[in-house]
Image (cartoon, rainbow, N blue to C red):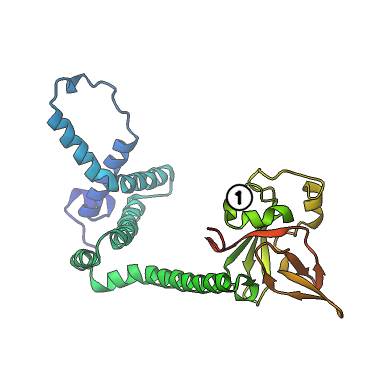
Amino acid sequence: MAMISDHPVEAATGVEPQRAASVVAIRRVGDWHHGPVSDDRSRWHGSNDRAEDEQGTELERLQPFLELAREISREVARLAADDSADVESLAETIDLIPRRERQRLTLGVFDRLPSEVQWSILERTFGDEEIREYLRTERASRLTALRRSDERRAVVGATRAAHRLDTREVPENEDLTLGLFREADARAAITRGHLSDVCARRLVLRSTGEAGVFRVIEDVFNPRGGYFVTAEYDEDTWHGERLPAHASVRVGSISDVPAGSSFEPMLYPGGRADFQMEGKIGRGRLHIGFIMVGDVDVFAS
């Protein structure tokens, strides 16, 4: 036999009084967020500076919670517009929002505070299992970022030492950016790197994981707008050798030997950039002024 609550809110809605009270409170937050704000400030005339300072301090303390209030308000408005939504749906939505917000706050605390303070607060606030759940993904993400950083650092160090880049050593999913210049401009551009305005062509390639093979991400003519266009290399010339988006390509240097031409996956600052695509090798018209591995400008001063 079903029990009938003697609490008027629970009897009318089927929702526990505490959750129903949350619904009412959140509706008030939504009303506050969207409601009109009076321009009548006359009642504040004559208030002392200390009261205004205290009010400002209070607003600063509440600032981190304003986005939560806005999010709750948006959810309330969405459910209010849904004819099929009931009080239970609204209560369930409210139950979910604090969990998402707790996760954001946890990661925020983890990022900003000294380690001993982080764990002291987290242990008092959440249980061990909840902390592990929130931080497991963050830990995996940071480990991946550290591994990528170590791999990038190793490639950059080896490239600087050898004064050339072996493209087979670029880690999988890492971006390789090449700044290509007229031969007369390339040597002067090396120390300035990607900040040089006279770059004629910029290539962004992403390593596929297959040694020396890249996916074309970007091929741009005169990327910084400072290149002085000449008949030697103009936009029509660039169109003629532009690499198709997402094409697989090898980039390196062509060497002429008595037996013919050979392609090696090596790039030299100031040297010409050549390409191999679909088994065919092609000589480039431009020379390398800068090489970036990820966000590191390898040879720039």
Q: Is residue 177 left or right of residue 145?
A: right
Q: Which residue is mark 1?
A: 196
Q: Nearer the viewer, residue 251 or 189?
A: 189
Q: Which residue appears at 61% of the width and 58% of the height?
A: 190
The residue at the far right in this view is 259
Query: What type is the residue that disc 1 sits on?
Result: Ser
Q: Nearer the viewer, residue 88 or 108?
A: 108
| Vertical position of residue 5 compared to residue 165: above or below | above
Q: Which residue appears at 76% of the width and 56% of the height?
A: 242
| Vertical position of residue 78 compared to residue 268: above or below | above
* Mark 1 residue element: loop
Q: Nearer the viewer, residue 49 or 150?
A: 150
Q: Is residue 241 left or right of residue 50?
A: right
Q: Is residue 32 left or right of residue 169?
A: left
Tag count: 1
Q: Nearer the viewer, residue 46 or 35?
A: 46
Q: Quadrant of residue 111?
A: bottom left
Residue 113 in the image: state x and y as whole percent: 26, 60
The residue at the far bottom in this view is 259
Residue 96 in the image: state x and y as whole percent: 34, 58
Which image quarter is the N terminus in? bottom left
Is any part of residue 182 visible from this angle?
no
Is any part of residue 136 visible from this angle?
yes
Q: Which residue appears at 72% of the width and 68% of the height?
A: 249
Q: Quadrant of residue 208?
A: bottom right
Residue 244 in the image: state x and y as whole percent: 75, 59
Residue 32 in the image: state x and y as whole percent: 29, 36
Query: Which class describes the residues within 10 Å of circle 1: few (<14), some (14-19), or many (20+)?
Result: many
Q: Which residue appears at 87% of the width and 80% of the height?
A: 259
